[in-house]
Amino acid sequence: MSDIKIKITDRDGVLHEIDAPTDMNMNLMEVVRSYELAPEGTIGICGGMAMCASCQCYVNSGHDLPEKSDDEEAMLSEAFNVEDNSRLGCQIHMTEALDGLEVELAPEEI
């Protein structure tokens, strides 16, 4: 089993340093849910299909992430609180290259 260390700042501003598995084909949204870093029902509402922006996060480290898909671009264009470093957590898959990733969960859209 191969884990990476990532830092996630939750919506209350609390920093969590966690181990994320790279051998389970998990994305960042699933990692956040598995560690219960956001209240149930407030993240990953669409199940990771890039059809909502509930898993929007801000990438604060300089990691080289895959290009945004058309679906991710479209969803972010309609979302609130979007910044230049906004991504959908469901589109960031855990790989060894993301060791040290630092993200902040975007405020919940109401």
Image: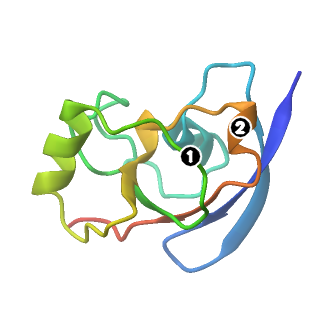
Give the percent coordinates (x, y) of residue 72: 25, 39
Q: Is residue 42 visible?
A: no
- Depth check: give the residue in front, 55 or 87: 87
Q: What number is the disc on residue 97?
A: 2
Mark 2–mark 1 contact, CB under 8 Å? Answer: yes
With respect to residue 50, does 56 lie above or below? Answer: below
Q: Quadrant of residue 67?
A: top left
Q: Is residue 86 visible?
A: yes
**Residue appearing at x 56%, y 43% in the figure:** 33
Residue type, numbered disc 2: Ala
Give the percent coordinates (x, y) of residue 36: 61, 51
Residue type, numbered disc 1: Asp
- Give the structural element (helix, strand or loop) at label 1: loop
- Depth check: give the residue in front, 21 or 62: 62
Mark 1 sits on what residue? 64
**Residue appearing at x 43%, y 37% in the figure:** 90
* Residue situated furthest bottom in the rendering: 13
With respect to residue 12, does 63 lie above or below? Answer: above
**Other-residue count near label 2 (Cα within 10 Å), few / some / many at <14 / 14–19 / ≥20:** few
- Position of 98 with respect to 79 (left or right) is right
